[in-house]
Image (cartoon, rainbow, N blue to C red):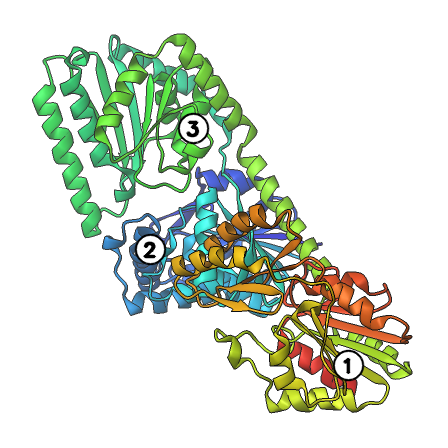
Amino acid sequence: MSKTIIVSNRLPVKITEKDGEYVLNPSEGGLATGLGSIYRQGYNIWVGWPGIDVIEEAQPQIRDQLSELNLRPVYLTQEEINNYYEGFSNEVLWPVFHYMSVYARYEQVYWDFYYQVNCKFRDIVLQVAEPGDVIWIHDYQLLLLPGMIRAELPDVAIGYFQHIPFPSFELFRLIPWRCELLEGMLGADLLGFHTFDDSHHFLNAVTRLLPVNASANVVMVNDRAVIAETFPMGIDNEKFEQLSDDSEVLRQMESLKENFQHTRMVLSIDRLDYSKGIIQRLQAFELFLQLYPEYVEKVILYMIVVPSRDTVPQYKELKEAIDMLAGGINARFRTINWHPINYFYRSFPVEVLAALYNFADVGLVTPMRDGMNLVSKEYVASRKNNDGVLILSEMAGASRELIDAVIVNPNNIGAIARGLHQALNMSEREQQRRMKQMRQVVAKFNISHWVKLFMARLQEVKQLQQSMLARRMNMNMQAAVMNDYKSAGRRAIFLDYDGTLVGFQSNIDMASPDPDLYQLLKTLADDPANQVVMISGRKHETLEEWLGHLPLDLIAEHGAWTKKYGEDWQMLPGLTAQWKQDILPILDTYMDRTPGSFIEEKSYSLVWHYRKVETGLGELRANELMNTLRYFTSDIGLQLLPGDKVIEIKNVEINKGKATLSWLQERKFDFTLAIGDDHTDEDIFKALPPNAVTIKVGSQVSAARYYLRNHQEVRAFLRTLVS
């Protein structure tokens, strides 16, 4: 039986110790609720740290207690907790990922422990993982784990979900260990993020820092397709709807009504953290009371701040700043029977929170940065009468879904103050319209929907990888091709040059053949059964200089020029180069605007190269240029060919496929082989009969039957044919 293994920093239980006795209590966290349905079934397991430093003698007993709940502990020492969790996770990753990089401390010891603890998690996972299992890893404390598990179990299905934002490349690149973190993440098959921006930032970082290619949201890592997707996380909406009718919640609501009879409540609930925008929220409330003095004694801000890491200097300072600001506002505005801010620095049971969600007229959620922010969704889910107004920061992931909230920039205290005024004056009808829409979203995209969606997508990714593996040329396929090759009397072999037999050079003239390639081509061509054709986009003069002395046929400039061995070059009749005078000035303009780009002129085509251009800028300009050229070339018989870091404009009559068919005319072969790496080679693959052996280099999206990864694999394959 295959099983699902969930791995997160913390187990979904709270362990408390009293006089050497350990007591387990289930945790109320959103993740614990969502994944509860999974880890309690069958043989499934949840791996994580139990939350406290457990003495060695008690470890076996706790392990037994936890295993009854399908949980597996990873025991950490106090030193590991200090350096891996408090250190690297919360003093490097947390600030950088929340765009507060000034708070980050890049200590080598933090990294050493982060690596060590990720290894500990790996060892526990490997004790329980078997082939066919699905491993789902959660959050930024375990970024190295997917790669570590992949190294040991290459075929297992691994999903990773990031619960906090992923920063833009400019911030992420500040981390000294940035490449190791990305390589760890790419061990997963599917990477989930809350928003499209987060997944986009991740893909940008990966393609700019690592030697990998991404197309759309698919990254190719050693032939394995890794997909980065958006999965906005939901909540258990039914739990909050049902809590509205709970007797304890109703009792709490009665007492709230008694205490705040004629006052309207604005509710704010956060953990103590600099990413939550608590200071700005208080300043905005103060400004609101200044701008709209008619609300004095009519509105209160009910602010709950849940204690968190208040021994860390930044958090301690933040706590003191909040205390002072809240105290100052209360001192300035309060009257005999009214306190503007009711401020609590502690956590409350879920029943009290549910009562507040039900009672508050306005939910005020304005973090500076937040992966998702589930408080906003809990507030919406609790509003069974479809009333109330949610004010939500545009920097929270939830703002992408809850578009009917009053959306504000959390740095703009004027906008938050105006948002409060708008919310408190909103008509019943408008409240109903907005809340109804938001409640539908929260109900549909709930936590179980999120889990189902992620797991289904992970299965799809594994199937996609399998289907791609089927075409990757393995040893069996090579052996079958070898047999056909050996038994054939006459063989035609079509080879592209750049990207197929040699790697790409930033200087195009540096890609001349090396002695090893000369030897390989000579051996192939010396076999009397072989007719070898070099079919390239290169100028015919270049091919003549590099390969004219070998017993090969040459086709240059995609078929504009052909030369049979021992004969002279022939030009394709009826071609014109008149169009160049119209197109060259356009290419010149783009070359001037794009440092590093250059133009190559061939007899009947023009090529704009951007292989030396800064990543991102090259692609942007190439798209612009394609759009401009489409307009000019549509009616004058020209074809646009986007290739690897090039755009080529050529006469439509010139085509590698046509050149191949023309060369094959009136000749019969028992075996045909064609190998190429780009857009232009697809024409050859399509032109050849279905029984031909066609091989695409470096990509799977092709009309070819097989693919090889790079020019080294092509050379190795050709060597096996001639050996």
Crowd class of label 3 (few under 14; some 14 to 19; many from 20; radius 10 Å):
many
- Label annotation for residue 110: none
Where is residue 59 drawn, in percent x and y?
44, 60
Residue occupied by mark 3: 378
Q: Nearer the viewer, mark 1 or mark 3?
A: 1
- Write the residue at 72% across / 85% down: 719
Where is residue 135 drawn, in percent x and y?
58, 55
Residue 360 occupies quadrant: top left
SS at mark 1? Answer: loop
Where is residue 721 drawn, in percent x and y?
78, 84
Where is residue 627 drawn, in percent x and y?
54, 48
Image quarter of the N terminus:
bottom right
Q: What's the amino acid at mark 1?
A: Lys
- Write the residue at 90% across / 81% down: 488
Crowd class of label 1 (few under 14; some 14 to 19; many from 20; radius 10 Å):
some
Q: Is residue 300 above or below residue 600?
A: above
Q: Is residue 181 above or below residue 161?
A: below
Residue occupied by mark 1: 564
State the CA–CA distance, disc 3 to disc 2: 31 Å
